[in-house]
Image: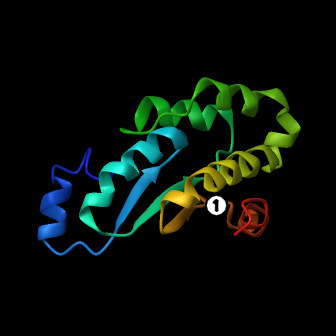
């Protein structure tokens, strides 16, 4: 995950003095967990990247324009299901909290990229049980 699009391998990053890894936004915990099995060999902490998805449109934009990020169809449908709940940020916070809960046993930290929704972070942390 961290090195897919940087041009540097993880081995090169560790040799250059990397003290930890931080992933791009994760929307598929099962892929992150598989990545973490491989990342153990480097003996470095990993922070999982979390973005609170604001809308189905934002998720589609990331799918089409951000290398290495894939928001699954079921999450797109969840964001479309209740437009008012999504607009209020509730759906995105629920999704992000679910991802954190699934990933936190496998990583050493969480990097939340709130993208203007910093006010949602307390609710996110509460739901994620952090």
Quadrant housing residue 55:
top right
- Measured as percent of width and height from the top left, residue 54 is found at 68, 45
Identity of the residue drawn at 12% across and 69% down: 15
Query: Please, is residue 80 above or below residue 130 in the view?
Result: above
For the C terminus, the quadrant is bottom right
Please state which of residues 42 and 122 is positioned toward the viewer in this rendering: 42
**Disc 1 element:** loop
- Measured as percent of width and height from the top left, residue 36 is found at 39, 52
Identity of the residue drawn at 83% across and 49% down: 88
Q: Is residue 97 left or right of residue 17?
A: right
Count neighbours of disc 1 (C-alpha within 10 A) and say few if under 14, some if 14 to 19, many if 20 or more.
Answer: few
- Measured as percent of width and height from the top left, residue 126 is found at 78, 66
Q: Is residue 115 left or right of residue 31?
A: right
> Which residue has dot 1 on it?
116
Identity of the residue drawn at 48% across and 58% down: 48
Identity of the residue drawn at 41% across and 43% down: 34
């Amino acid at each position: 995950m961290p090195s897919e699009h940087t041009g540097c391998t993880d081995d090169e990053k560790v040799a250059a003095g990397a003290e930890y890894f931080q992933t791009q936004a994760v929307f598929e915990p099962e892929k992150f967990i598989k990545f973490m099995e491989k990342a153990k060999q480097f003996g470095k902490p990993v922070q999982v990247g979390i973005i609170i998805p604001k809308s189905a449109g934002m998720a589609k934009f990331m799918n089409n324009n951000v290398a290495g990020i894939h928001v699954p169809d079921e999450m797109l449908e969840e964001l479309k299901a209740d437009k008012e709940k999504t607009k209020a940020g509730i759906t995105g916070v629920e999704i992000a909290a679910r991802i954190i809960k699934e990933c936190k046993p496998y990583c050493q930290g969480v990097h939340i990229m709130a993208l203007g929704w910093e006010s949602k972070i307390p609710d996110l942390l509460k739901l994620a049980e952090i």
